[in-house]
Amino acid sequence: MLEFFLSNKKAFFDVLSMWILAVMMPGPDMFLVITSAIKKNKKYALSAVYGIVAGTIVWLIVGFFLIGMLSKTSFFQWVQLCGGCYLLYMTCKIFLSLFAKSSQDFQSQESFVPQENRSKAFMSGVMTNLSNPKAPIFVGSVLTKLPQETPLEGSLVCFVLMLLIPMIWFSLVAHFFSIKRIFSLFLRYAKVLDVLAVCIFGIVGIELLREFFGF
């Protein structure tokens, strides 16, 4: 298998490079982690990261193994509807928080996070990640760069690497925005961050619903 990787290293490099760039691009996942780290704390943000990774596992499985079958059904259209509705729900929730909270309401970075709150953060990560039905389509299109004769072991290695990349990246983001100095700086601009999150979640949610209804 090592020989196969070496002989096709450019194809694997291209796939992983595109995946890294896609993961690092600002989007709902990124803003969920950042706002969780700033408004709650690192443990809460990491729970959201684990949820994002769980959602990524689902989309990677679909992208690697099921996209051909599911693309012939209305599965992705219904995911668009549910995803768009969920992101608009998040948009409304964040928008209302602009008027309901002040910076004093944010939890201390050292505060204890109850288990139920971590579960809530985890589910927010799962739902935010799964709200984007374009993810498995992107995965499927990226994987077309792999050689058709890629063995199962090669696909599994690529699968694991594509899973580790968002786990490492979003964990670093959670740790970075949990640093006290960074936290204090961004706390001053928390309202601005909320407005950005409203824009990101709202635009993506509206776009998903627009595509579902064919506008």
Image (cartoon, rainbow, N blue to C red):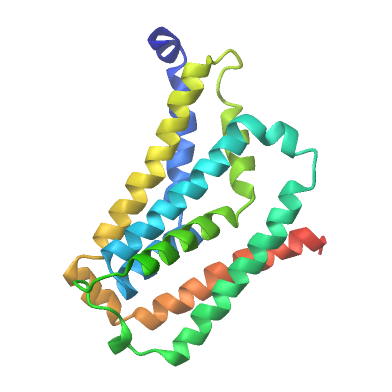
Quarter holding residue 127 = bottom right
Q: Residue at x 31, y 67 (%)?
A: 37
Q: Is residue 131 left or right of residue 18?
A: right
Residue under the point 66% across and 64% down? 84
Report if residue 11 is visible in the image.
no
In the figure, residue 16 lies in which quadrant? top left
Determine whether 137 is above or below 175 in the image: above
Q: Is residue 17 above or below residue 203?
A: above
In the image, what residue occupies the spot 61% across and 64% down? 204
Residue 189 position, x and y percent, is 33, 80
Looking at the rendering, in which quadrant would you find the C terminus?
Answer: bottom right
Q: Which residue is drawn at 38% across and 39% down?
A: 164
| Total number of numbered discs in the rendering | 0
Q: Which residue lies furthest to the top in this view?
A: 3
* Rendering coords of residue 24 (x, y %): 42, 50
Is residue 17 visible to the viewer in this orientation of the structure? yes
Q: Which image quadrant: the N terminus?
A: top left
Residue 13 image offset from top left, x and y in percent: 43, 27
